[in-house]
Image: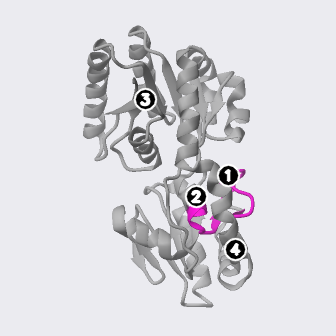
Amino acid sequence: MRTVLHVGPSTSRGGMGAVIQLLADNPPTQWNAETMASHADGGVVPVLKAWWNVRRNLHTRLQRENVDLVHIHTASNWSWKRKKGLIKIAQKANVPVVLSIHSGNFDMLCKERGPEVNRICSTLHTVLLTDGWEARLRTWLGDTSVIPNPVPKVTVTSERDRTQFLLMGRSNPMKGQAIAMEAVRILRKSRSDVTLHLTGVTHSEPGIVGHGWVEGKEKERLLSTCGTLLSPSKWEGLSMSVIEAMARGMPILASKASDGVFEKSGKIIESSAISYADAMEEMMDGKAWKDMAKAGPKEAEKYKLEHVVSMWGQLYDEVLT
């Protein structure tokens, strides 16, 4: 059995951590998987401690000579700066490196530090999440592979309350919570039954419920009962909440950041509160909701965990040979 070591924010909240855990818990055939956390939630001090620890631990782990491949997961900005050092440690140990780029604004980093990105990525195998990202970053990265985020087995739910909307994501202005909240305020001027559920955010006002960070049964309840997912993000790599909503039969209203992720199971919306309010009203009152809900599970098949894991297995084998 070969061993792949996933290095990234494996214990942190958010989509990248969820992806790493899914891949580590479901390695390809004939592979074992381990994880090593490069990030910690809780502020500057935990992040710095995690960074100091991962550099030491990665060097020590690779000296044992039973890791066949290091799979590094990066976003952009400070995440990229930290991962550069980890790539160097793995390469000095003569262990092949696969780099997964999860960031939805990695193109901005490339515009600022293109030569550096090209120099580093030309020494390893880089993997992107969508064909759109491959086309956008080809100039800086050269040859790459495209493997999407995986969706675990989920339950398709058709009995949903269409007056309930869900937005999942960490508390960050780029996630577009302000747009969704203002859209609900607009709608509630004419109808009082609409409610927006926010995860990762603590907030409370009529029609808006901030649940904070959710997982387990509470996350499952929201994903199984709310009518439509909102994703008004300024940028995304490949939103885990969007592709999981598709698999569950939950229609999506998303910004251009999710353009190309779906065809019939959602709708791309201009990034304004009025545009979202109009689209949300259509979801509550029109036939479009049923058509999108029906299309989602079929369109999400390409994101199924077993399919994505098989793609990783093929790539790992190719890199080693």
Q: Quadrant of the C terminus?
A: top right
Return the mark for residue 31. 3
User: Which amino acid, by three-letter code, is at mark 1?
Assistant: Val
Figure check: 117 above or below 101: above
Report how far apart the C-alphas of labels 4 and 1 lie in the structure. Answer: 18 Å
**Residue in the picture at 60% in, 49% down:** 303
Q: Mark 4 points at which residue?
A: 279
Residue 29's tag is: none
Location of residue 187 in the rendering, given as x and y in whole percent from the top left corner: 61, 83
Tell me the kind of residue under disc 2: Val
Q: Point out the frontmost of discs 3 and 1.
A: 3
> Dot 3 surroundings within 10 Å: few (below 14), some, or many (20 or more)?
some
Span colored in magenta: 245-267
Number of marks = 4
**Res. 266 image quadrant:** bottom right
Question: Which badge, 2 or 4, is on the more N-terminal residue?
Answer: 2
Q: Who comes first in sequence, dot 2 or dot 1?
A: 2
Identify the image quadrant of the N terminus. top left
